[in-house]
């Protein structure tokens, strides 16, 4: 008998009907003979609603209370799924993150899993029960409840799969798998049969919200293959794993995009040691994550420093950076909130020249101006005007022939 970890996202458990549907799917899978641990997210928009509520009663809700509050979303979903399964005649038990043995550090709202003690889960499984675990949460050594950051239930599922040495980790959501591009932007986008951890990590980090980047990273580290599929359709989904079939190795696999990009430029900065640290340390302290950073070569010891942040963090970031810019003698500090990112991703690009040139010429033929460029071994990203992102993605999808069956 093998062990399967499944994960159901918020839309898959959004209401009573959806929960009953999930319960039936879980039982059908269990009846094939494998043991099952199922991780669930909070129902629908519960987490957002709880955050709003917290801010209605307090300007500063406090991280500890907020984590305890948010963890209840997943508790609601996990208990309801367990009840639905039992009402259909199968054995099930719900466990909170703490009960499932998930020990984390004390960084509230972005805790990291330190260790999992699977003994309680094992005991319940051996008694023949389906174990439903509340995702997105854990507990500190001091017995405080923590959460793993937005979208953290994916991380719970992969971590449990690694700890329990599961045969598979199946993630069920409202999309059918991973695509060559977002099908809402590119109607001819194709669903991928499989993709490597590396590629998926870039896709997740550069725009797709389908699997949380941290979960992909963890999956790669422990070699836990993740199947991404829809909980509503019978489509076989996309397998994220180590090996990708030979014939697709030589290609671009996916065009990712992100519309949530803002840029800050600190112009006319004196070029001397410590300047970058003086800007980025306070940003990090304020909890603002900075993405692309570009520093120009200096002329006469004066340079420009440009970086991007999520649009929702622009105001906060400007409040941090403006006084620093002034104090280090920068000429000015300007921002642009309406940018987007488009990325070409594929392990096939490694060591083969020409991909960047094809990307840039495709964009220039469409009259799209590139503002910043960044690359990794398997990704090329251009930051462009937000309004041109759709066009860019469609054009690149065509250039790299992603609509053609491989
Ligand atoms: N409910 C949490 C969130 O909305 C965690 C998750 O869905 O994975 O971020
Ligand atoms: Mg959610």
Image (tube, helix red, strand yellow):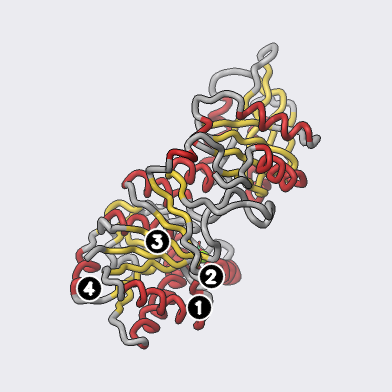
Estimate the spatial distance between the alpha carbons at disc 1 and disc 2, rounded to whole Å: 8 Å
Q: Is residue 375 above or below residue 232?
A: above
Which residue is disc 1 drawn over? 18
**Circle nearer the N terminus (1, 2):** 2
Q: Is residue 331 left or right of residue 211?
A: right
Q: Is residue 122 above or below residue 257?
A: below
Which of these two is toward me, 44 or 347?
A: 347
Which of these two is toward me, 290 or 8?
A: 8
Q: Residue at x 38, y 66 (%)?
A: 39
Which of these two is toward me, 289 or 29?
A: 29
Which residue is disc 3 drawn over? 170
Instruction: Give the numbered dot on residue 11.
Output: 2
Quarter occupied by the C terminus: top right
Secondary element at image label 1: helix
Estimate the spatial distance between the alpha carbons at disc 4 and disc 3, rounded to whole Å: 20 Å
Within 10 Å of the Cα at label 3, are there few (<14), some (14-19), or many (20+) other Cα atoms? many
**Circle nearer the N terminus (4, 3):** 4
Within 10 Å of the Cα at label 2, are there few (<14), some (14-19), or many (20+) other Cα atoms? some
Q: Residue at x 38, y 65 (%)?
A: 6
Labelled pair 4, 3 in contact (Cβ < 8 Å): no
**Circle nearer the N terminus (2, 4):** 2
Labelled pair 2, 4 in contact (Cβ < 8 Å): no
Quarter of the image for residue 126 reads bottom left
Instruction: Give the numbered dot on residue 181.
Output: none
Labelled pair 1, 2 in contact (Cβ < 8 Å): yes
Query: Would residue 94 be seen by someone viewing this image from the given angle?
Result: yes
Q: Is residue 285 left or right of residue 364?
A: left
Secondary element at image label 3: strand
Secondary element at image label 4: helix
In the rendering, at what x and y percent does residue 318 appear? Answer: 67, 42
Which residue is disc 4 drawn over? 124
């Amino acid at each position: 008998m093998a062990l399967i970890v499944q994960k159901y996202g918020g839309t898959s458990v959004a209401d009573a009907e959806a929960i009953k549907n999930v319960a039936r799917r879980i039982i059908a899978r269990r009846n094939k003979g494998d043991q099952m641990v199922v991780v669930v997210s909070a129902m629908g928009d519960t987490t957002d609603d709880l955050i709003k509520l917290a801010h209605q009663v307090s300007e500063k809700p406090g991280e500890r209370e907020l984590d305890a509050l948010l963890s209840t979303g997943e508790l609601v979903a996990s208990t309801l799924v367990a009840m639905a399964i039992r009402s259909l005649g199968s054995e099930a038990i719900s466990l909170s993150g703490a009960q499932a043995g998930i020990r984390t550090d004390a960084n509230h709202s972005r805790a990291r899993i330190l260790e999992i003690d699977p003994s309680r889960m094992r005991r319940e499984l051996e008694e023949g029960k389906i174990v439903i675990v509340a995702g997105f949460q854990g507990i500190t050594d001091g017995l405080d409840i923590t959460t793993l950051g937005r979208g953290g239930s994916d991380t719970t599922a992969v971590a449990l799969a690694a700890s329990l040495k599961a045969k598979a980790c199946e993630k069920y959501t409202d999309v059918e798998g991973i695509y060559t591009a977002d099908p809402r932007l590119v109607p001819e986008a194709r669903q991928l049969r499989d993709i490597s951890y590396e590629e998926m990590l870039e896709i997740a980090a550069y725009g797709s919200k389908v699997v949380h980047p941290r979960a992909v990273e963890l999956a790669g580290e422990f070699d836990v293959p993740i199947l991404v599929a829809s909980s509503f359709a019978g489509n076989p989904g996309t397998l994220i794993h180590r090996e990708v079939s030979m014939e697709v190795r030589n290609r671009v696999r996916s065009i990712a995009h992100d519309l949530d990009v803002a840029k800050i430029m600190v112009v006319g900065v004196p070029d001397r040691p410590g300047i970058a640290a003086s800007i980025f340390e306070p940003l990090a302290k304020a909890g603002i994550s900075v993405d692309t950073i570009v520093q120009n070569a200096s002329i006469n010891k004066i340079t420009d420093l440009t970086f991007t942040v999520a649009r929702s963090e622009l105001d906060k970031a400007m409040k941090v950076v403006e006084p620093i810019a002034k104090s280090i003698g920068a000429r000015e500090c300007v921002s642009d909130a309406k940018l987007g990112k488009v990325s070409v991703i594929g392990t096939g690009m490694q060591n083969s020249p020409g991909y960047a040139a094809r990307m840039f010429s495709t964009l220039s033929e469409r009259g799209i101006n590139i503002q910043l460029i960044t690359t990794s071994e398997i990704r090329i990203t251009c930051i462009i005007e937000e309004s041109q992102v759709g066009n860019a993605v469609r054009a690149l999808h065509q250039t790299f022939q992603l609509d053609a069956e491989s």
